[in-house]
Image (cartoon, rainbow, N blue to C red):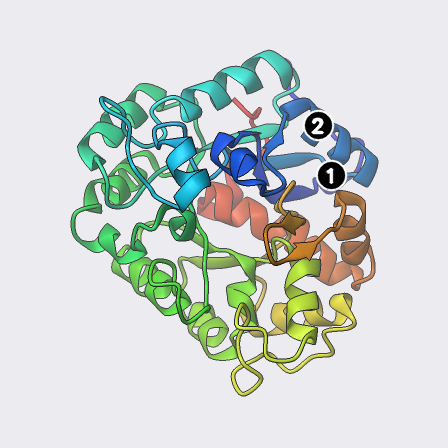
Amino acid sequence: MPEHRDTKTVTRYDVHTHVGADTGFYLRGWWPYSATAQDLLGHMDAAGVDRAVCFPFTLPSAFDACAFADGGQLSLLPGRFPFDRENELLVRELERIDTHGRLYAFAFFDPSRCVDQQVRALETLAGRIHGLKTQTTILESPIRALVNEGRELMEFAEQHDLPVLVHTAVYPKDRWAQAADCLAVAEAYPRVRFNLAHSLRFDAECLKRAAQLPNVWVDCAAHLAQCRLAAEPDSPFVAPPSRRVDADYHRPAEVLQAVHALLGGRYLWGSDNPYMSWSDDTLRIVYSYEQEAAVLEQVPETVRTDMASVAPVAWLFGNGGRGADRPGR
């Protein structure tokens, strides 16, 4: 396939996007529930973004979608294992649609269920994927499982030099993706390059710890939604004021600069497309790709270059960024 040629001197990356569909979310009445590679490329073109990391949606078809929609139950269907179809489907979609190799496919995984089967499936995709991703809150699968029963997944990442992106949470009732647990997993695998998502929910102590770990980057995915939650009184979904990064959360660009200063150049720009928006039974937060990208334009050029170009290359490729000019596949 021909390589994408950038017209700018600096290539701009979006490190956090989804491509695919989620039947469980759709049947439950949650939104968004789908996005295509063509959708993503259109948003990128409009915003001046050159390349992006993308991965499937969170709840795979291996789980009973009706049981999830009707009662919030996570029940594997007979003969299935997590992401047994979605990872291959994503790779095939990119190979058909992303003809310039601008999108980097990351395979989704579940840290605790059917690990052997997942790894065998990942082996068949080696060379066609560029990293791994997990979102343990929806899967109700503890991130700390990667230190025990899920170890083989991280060994696969080490063997193939794949970066790993991890969803994080600080919501007290979330037992699966606590930011402190995500940091502990990253510390357990110093040879794996981790991206701990969502600005670690603006938890200053966690961000300072992340800055001390040379194999940890942090992305700002769904930044506008996170800032809105932080600007509300007593939101449990971001760090409490006593632990929160000191910034004006009504000014999202200022928040980006404050977190960037804490992380010393290992802060990544990501949109979370289409999950910069979220709507469920109780919450409605709707932003666009254009709005997320506009915030990036409001920070100083040095910060913007670090977040959207320099740091993504280091996280994705390691070794000083060697291989960054290769095609998406």
Look at the numbered disc 2 and give the secondary structure of its residue: helix
Relative to residue 115, is residue 245 depicted above or below? below
Considering the image in quadrants, where does the N terminus appear? top right
Which residue of the protein is positioned furthest toward the bottom in this rendering? 242
Look at the numbered disc 1 and give the secondary structure of its residue: loop
The amino acid type, in three-letter code, at marker 1 is Val
Q: Looking at this view, is 52 or 203 the one in front?
A: 203
Q: Residues within 10 Å of mark 2 (few under 14, many from 20)?
A: few
Q: Looking at this view, is 124 or 1 the one in front?
A: 124
Give residue 49's mark: 1
- The Cα–Cα distance between marks 2 and 1, rounded to whole angstroms, is 13 Å
Residue at 78 percent of width and 63 percent of height: 299
Residue at 56 percent of width and 45 percent of height: 313
Give residue 39's mark: 2
* Whole-percent x, y for residue 250 in the image: 77, 73
Residue at 50 percent of width and 38 percent of height: 322
Total labels: the figure holds 2
Q: Is residue 144 visible?
A: yes
Q: Residues within 10 Å of mark 1 (few under 14, many from 20)?
A: some
